[in-house]
Amino acid sequence: QVQLVESGGGLVQDGGSLRLSCAASGITISINAMGWYRQAPGKQRELVAVIKHGGSSDYADSVKGRFTISRDNAKNAVYLQMNSLKPEDTAVYYCKVNILFNDYWGQGTQVTVSS
């Protein structure tokens, strides 16, 4: 059974940094894409960043230049380094992995940026 466990969320001041981690277990084949999504209160879940197995990545315009996604294929882990955080980055952050044709989600970790 595939399980994703996120960590690293918390409360940070405007301009601060956080690093999110997501570790996947119960996986016996290569993970295709790994990504981070977020959902703010009253808003739809949105893509933040995605990274493919080969390392190519893409970002939402709102986080380009501030966030960096990376992965460790040997550990089945994905990370999100978030710098220059803004109050509008406040949300629950979820990791998602794609294996063959299936998507798996983590339980989410809260990120709160105070002004």
Image: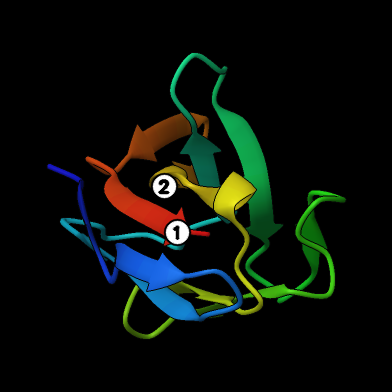
Label 1 packing within 10 angstroms: few (<14), some (14-19), many (20+) = some
Looking at the image, is 9 positioned above or below residue 60? below
Where is residue 8 drawn, in percent x and y? Answer: 28, 71
Q: Position of residue 56 (x, y in %)?
A: 79, 70
Local packing at callout 2 (Cα closer than 10 Å; few below 14, some 14-19, many 20+) is many
Instruction: Evaluate if marks 2 and 1 touch, with contact meaning CB atoms under 8 Å apart.
Output: no
Disc 1 residue type (three-letter): Ser
Q: Is residue 104 above or below residue 26?
A: above
| Residue 10 shown left or right of residue 13 in the figure | left
Answer above or below: position of 30 versus 2: below
Between 8 and 105, the one nearer to me in the picture: 8
Which is nearer the eye, 88 or 105? 88
Q: Amino acid at mark 2?
A: Tyr
Placement of the N terminus among the 4 image quadrants: top left
In the rendered image, residue 27, in percent from the top left (x then y), is placed at 25, 57
42 to the left or right of 60: left
The residue positioned 41% from the left and 47% from the top of the image is 93
Name the residue rendered at 48%, 30% in the picture.
40
Kindly identify the residue that appears in the image at 43 percent across and 23 percent down: 41
Query: What residue did someone put label 2 on?
Result: 93
Q: Nearer the viewer, mark 2 or mark 1?
A: 1
| Side of 89 relative to 13 (left or right) | right
Mark 1 = which residue? 114
